[in-house]
Image (tube, rainbow, N blue to C red):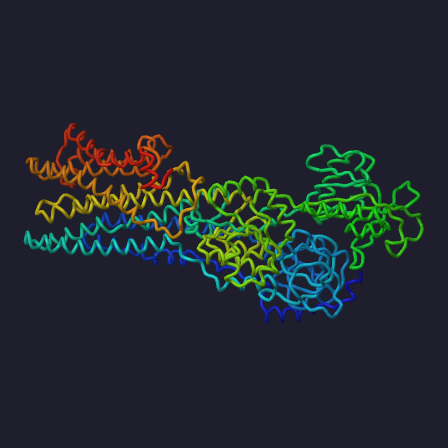
């Protein structure tokens, strides 16, 4: 290799000028959001504006305490959101390690180490083993240069680089003997001089980043549905409030109190808890899932996870470990399986010995690392380890001969020892094999390749200690055997895929690797392939309509480009599927952002991939995606149960406020009663539902239909029936006690206590739609017991503390009255307990097995 004097770098002045003109060599990244921006994004949501508006109404009414409670609750939610968002951004910043590697650059005849972000077009770089390539460039000269381009291409095996011939045009990454290197890739062997051709947005990495700009995050269906429901209920509340004002004014001639009664009904009807539930559940869900080392970038994606029907998986580094492992060895037609056959037989020692001699001692090349690791395990303390030998000469791979040799000298040997490894056909050529022997080896190579293995051959030779020949062919090589390598599957992947199948989630492999390798891995991990693979060239010829049909039956896509990954994801979405996409490479970023749920690997993944994803797996453990899906389903189930509970409890609250006005009876609930029901019991119960463990069948049922609304006819009917039965119970209590002559205060006390007890029972019965209230009480749920204890304490205080009893305008209740209220409250939900106990009814009406 020529010295650095053979190439001319930029002058420091010219580099500074270009840096000022072209900007820093940085990848596109999401704009960092400050606290004020996060607050603005939270409070501009219509649902939060509604909360603030209700608090303002309290202030106009002079109910400062109630207004303060509500507004403080709003600030608590904003605080939770800010904390979650800032923690997410800080974690992502800690993960950012690829954006600006330090690099060696030659400027003004001097070699400098500078941050990669300061590299400019035209710079002369010296890349060495272990360096991250900071920009796209052309190789001017190199020695044994191998580069890992898996982040761009998906291929786990490094590719060779050769010096530029002065003619070749820069193309896409991938394939051996290209004279170009690309930003973000890794030099695993050798060194070379590179002239920078493109930086920042103009690199291959930057081009993929630009593809993300046209893709915006989608609003989830639950967010849209909740907004619509809040709007409709709010409209209904305004209409009912107007009716109450008019009815009160006409029947009693008191328009001021009629106006107050109307506002009380509005407070009872307007569902301010809905946005609270949605925000709290998703924020706390993100906090819970972070304990499993899963970082949530887009909180709303958690509820979408429960509806995921297709999981698109990148092979390299996601299903596999992205490292080569020595799987099989062949000597004299006898195979040795490294994983299954126990200690290495003596017969294979020489093959492994010369494999080590043909490799670098501290190599980054994954195949050489695998060879050295097996040698350390099997040949330690044997005569086959030669730590005191010295390397004399290297013969590098070339386009004409895909093999390399290393010449070694031992302290007491009279001859040089030469070890060679490379493509089986190249090693066979060096050994001058032909006829039947060559045919036998070719047959073994084909058999190993069919198992998804990368195969190389190994040979040895000896040479007198005189001048070494110019080329490898001048040695008299002896063929030793074959080595087969595989990129092993991640531990637990097979079990995770099986759990996905049980949960009705279809797993699809999308990879840039070869079809045979993909098929073999699919068989190993239990991925249903049916022997069918679609390759990138085949996909290129398909129309969008044809691809939509193809994705209905094919689970493996091989040799695909980043643009094709995006097409595949969009084809699934066009078919109505809810798509989760996992990946760690830059090549995954557009598909990650387009997918309904993008899941990036955090440890090995790139910045672009992480910022495009909804979730980031910090430990790169594929099985974490299953835990995330489980959490997503649990979150959605609990949101649904909490929403139905809130919808249900508002019916008796609104009804017991409206009906006495229409019947010209005294008001049962005053603003203070509703304020305590809404701002103490309901928000606390939202936390109770959030803490509820998952249902037993959460991962054994198919994904929910994404087109099926949470508030569908069946669900709303169940909520309305629960609410109407409770309303009937509390209304009977009020009418019965009032017309018995017990007085307005005592009737109000009996009705209010019954309503609170019924509220508790609604919580218990809706916590699980597959288990009874007693089972819910036995479930570990600390917030539940806090709410139960707080509610019972609250009942005691308002009934037996004279000051509070006066504020709430209630009468003293005797023990038998309390028992009567508890019995009525429990009886109002017993029918729902029967519905859950009868299996056919439970399956039909509650969709629970």
Q: Is residue 584 visible?
A: no
Instruction: Report the side of 761 relative to 695 (left or right).
Output: left
Seen from the viewer's position, the closer of residues 802 and 738 is 738
Residue 287 picture location, percent across and down: 44, 44
Q: Residue at x 73, y 39 (%)?
A: 374
Question: Which residue is situated farthest in the top direction here?
Answer: 816
Instruction: Report the side of 347 relative to 681 (left or right).
Output: right
Residue 765 picture location, percent across and down: 30, 36
Seen from the viewer's position, the closer of residues 228 and 204 is 228
Residue 120 picture location, percent across and down: 64, 66
| Depicted 253 relative to depicted 820: above or below | below
Q: Is residue 329 visible?
A: yes
Locate the N terminus and report the quarter of the image it occupies: bottom right
Q: Residue at x 9, y 47 (%)?
A: 663
Instruction: Report the side of 363 relative to 611 (left or right).
Output: right
Residue 454 picture location, percent across and down: 71, 48
Locate the C terminus and report the quarter of the image it occupies: top left
* Quarter-of-image position of residue 807: top left
| Depicted 798 relative to depicted 83: above or below | above
Seen from the viewer's position, the closer of residues 666 and 175 is 175
Q: Residue at x 65, y 68 (%)?
A: 121
| Numbered-mark total | 0
Instruction: Report the side of 30 relative to 467 (left or right).
Output: left
Seen from the viewer's position, the closer of residues 191 and 436 is 436
């Amino acid at each position: 290799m020529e010295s650095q004097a053979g190439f001319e770098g930029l002058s420091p002045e010219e580099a500074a000028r270009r840096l000022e003109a072209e900007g820093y060599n940085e990848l596109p990244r999401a704009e960092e959001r400050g606290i004020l921006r996060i607050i603005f994004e939270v409070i501009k949501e219509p649902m939060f504006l509604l909360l603030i508006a209700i608090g303002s109404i309290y202030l106009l009414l002079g109910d400062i305490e109630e207004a303060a409670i509500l507004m403080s609750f709003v600030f608590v939610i904003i605080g939770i959101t800010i904390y979650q968002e800032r923690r997410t951004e800080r974690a992502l910043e800690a993960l950012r390690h690829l954006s600006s590697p330090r690099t060696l650059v030659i400027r003004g005849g001097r070699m400098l180490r500078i941050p990669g972000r300061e590299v400019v077009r035209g710079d002369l770089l010296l890349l060495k083993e272990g360096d991250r390539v900071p920009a796209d460039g052309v190789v001017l000269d190199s020695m044994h240069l191998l580069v890992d381009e898996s982040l761009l291409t998906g291929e786990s095996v490094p590719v060779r680089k050769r010096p530029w011939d002065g003619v070749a045009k820069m193309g896409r990454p991938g394939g051996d003997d290209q004279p170009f290197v690309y930003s973000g890739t890794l030099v695993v062997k050798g060194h070379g001089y590179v002239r920078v051709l493109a930086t920042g947005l103009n690199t291959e990495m930057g081009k993929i980043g630009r593809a993300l700009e046209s893709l915006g995050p989608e609003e989830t269906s639950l967010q849209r549905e909740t907004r619509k429901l809040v709007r409709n209920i709010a409209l209904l509340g305004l209409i009912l409030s107007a009716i109450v004002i008019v009815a009160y004014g006409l029947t009693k001639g008191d328009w001021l109190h009629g106006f107050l009664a109307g506002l009380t009904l509005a407070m009872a009807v307007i569902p301010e808890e809905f946005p609270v539930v949605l925000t709290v559940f998703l924020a706390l869900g993100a906090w819970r899932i972070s304990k499993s080392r899963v970082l949530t970038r887009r909180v709303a994606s958690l509820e979408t996870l429960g509806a995921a029907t297709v999981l698109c998986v990148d092979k390299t580094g996601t299903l596999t470990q992205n490292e080569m492992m020595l799987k099989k060895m062949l000597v004299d037609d006898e195979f040795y399986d490294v994983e299954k056959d126990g200690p290495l037989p003596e017969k294979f020692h020489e093959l492994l010995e010369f494999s080590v001699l043909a490799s670098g001692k501290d190599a980054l090349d994954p195949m050489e690392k695998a060879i050295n690791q097996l040698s350390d395990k099997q040949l330690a303390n044997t005569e086959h380890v030669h730590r005191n030998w010295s390397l004399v000469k290297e013969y590098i791979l070339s386009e004409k001969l895909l093999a390399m040799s290393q010449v070694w000298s031992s302290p007491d040997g009279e001859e040089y020892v030469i070890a060679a490894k490379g493509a089986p056909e190249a090693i066979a050529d060096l050994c001058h094999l032909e006829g039947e022997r060559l045919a036998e080896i070719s047959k073994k190579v084909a058999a190993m390749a069919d198992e998804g293995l990368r195969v190389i051959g190994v040979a040895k030779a000896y040479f007198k200690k005189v001048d070494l020949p110019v080329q490898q062919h001048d040695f008299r090589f002896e063929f030793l055997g074959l080595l087969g390598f595989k990129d092993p599957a991640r531990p637990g992947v097979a079990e995770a895929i099986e759990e996905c199948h049980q949960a009705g989630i279809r797993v699809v492999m999308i990879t840039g690797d070869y079809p045979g390798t993909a098929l073999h891995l699919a068989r190993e991990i239990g991925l249903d392939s049916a022997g069918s693979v679609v390759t990138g060239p085949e996909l290129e010829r398909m129309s969008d309509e044809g691809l939509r049909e193809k994705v209905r039956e094919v689970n493996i896509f091989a040799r695909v480009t980043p643009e094709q990954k995006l097409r595949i994801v969009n084809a699934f979405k066009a078919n109505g599927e809810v798509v989760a996409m996992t990946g760690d490479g830059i090549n995954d970023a557009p598909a990650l952002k387009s997918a309904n749920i993008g899941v990036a690997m955090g440890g090995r993944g790139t910045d672009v991939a992480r910022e495009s994803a909804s979730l980031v797996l910090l430990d790169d453990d594929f099985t974490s995606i299953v835990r995330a899906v489980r959490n997503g389903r649990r979150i959605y189930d609990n949101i649904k149960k909490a929403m139905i509970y809130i919808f249900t409890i508002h019916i008796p609250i609104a009804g017991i406020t409206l009906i006495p006005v229409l019947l010209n009876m005294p008001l049962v609930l005053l603003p203070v009663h509703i304020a305590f029901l809404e701002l103490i019991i309901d928000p606390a119960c939202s936390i109770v539902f959030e803490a509820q463990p998952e249902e037993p069948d959460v991962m054994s049922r198919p994904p929910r239909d994404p087109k099926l609304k949470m508030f569908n006819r069946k669900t709303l009917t169940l909520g309305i029936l629960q609410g109407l039965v409770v309303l009937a119970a509390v209304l009977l209590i009020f009418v019965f006690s009032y017309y018995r002559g017990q007085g307005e205060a005592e009737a109000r006390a009996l009705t209010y206590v019954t309503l609170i007890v019924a509220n508790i029972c609604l919580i218990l019965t809706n916590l699980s739609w597959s288990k009874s209230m007693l089972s819910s009480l036995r479930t570990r749920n600390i917030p539940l017991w806090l709410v139960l204890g707080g509610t019972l304490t609250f009942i005691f205080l308002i009934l037996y503390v004279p000051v509070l009893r006066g504020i709430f305008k209630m009468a003293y209740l005797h023990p038998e009255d309390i028992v009567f209220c508890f019995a009525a409250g429990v009886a109002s939900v017993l029918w729902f307990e029967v519905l859950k106990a009868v299996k056919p009814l439970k399956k039909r009406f509650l969709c629970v097995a």
